[in-house]
Amino acid sequence: MTIEERIKEMMSGELYQATAAVELLELLDRCHDACERYNSLPPSAHAEREAQMRRLLGRTGKRFKILSPFVCDYGFNIEVGEDFFANMNMVVLDEARVTFGNNVFIGPNCSFYTPVHPLEVEPRRRGLERSLPIVVGDDVWFGGNVTVLPGVTIGSGTVIGAGSVVTRDVPAGVLAVGNPCRVIRQL
């Protein structure tokens, strides 16, 4: 299989062979190496850090800031809009597309996971998984230590409270908190 075919398979939403696909493992290593280089740059090296992140991510706005450390799996599946800010320790497992709108603010220690592993033992042993995209609208704020699970869409103008585990879609313009995350009130 070509690398393009492997990527298409990975992003299809169907089960695919994740752990034995040499092409994907090589891309994963390259991305983790790039994250390591980014994280080793001093915070004051603004131009270098921005250039490294632009090479790593699929799309960026003109203005964005991502604090170290930052880790992702592929990078090219991540899109960030204008005035995007991510605090330290952001983790993005981007086997599927992860899209952040404009004016998104992410607190420290937040994670965004697109892989879905089978509940049954045998498919997990065979290294099978699938991936589902995450979409975050404009003007969304994530408190610290938030985890967003595969296939979730978060509407514009929403606030996700610290420590929340977002297991399903959250509508626009609400405050949502908890584990599992649920809407508390309209904003």
Image: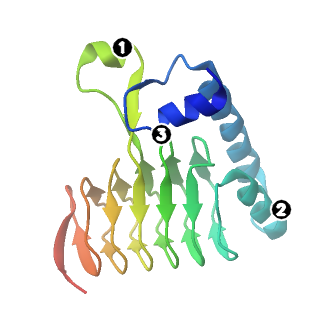
Q: In this rendering, does residue 42 appear at all?
A: no
First of labels 1, 2 by sequence position = 2
Q: Which mark is residue 11?
A: 3
Residue at (49, 66) in percent of width and height:
100
The answer to whether the residues at label 1 and label 2 have Cβ atoms under 8 Å apart is no
Q: Which residue position holds label 1?
A: 125
Q: Position of residue 177 (x, y in %)?
A: 23, 67
Identity, as a three-letter code, of the amino acid under mark 2 = Glu
Q: Position of residue 12 (x, y in %)?
A: 43, 38
Q: In this rendering, does residue 94 appear at all?
A: yes
Q: Helix, strand or loop at disc 1?
A: helix
Quadrant of the drawing holding the C terminus: bottom left
Judged left or right of residue 73, residue 180 is left
Q: Position of residue 140 (x, y in %)?
A: 41, 75
**Mark 1 and mark 3: Cα distance apart in space:** 21 Å
Disc 1 crowd rating (10 Å Cα; few below 14, some 14-19, many 20+) is: few
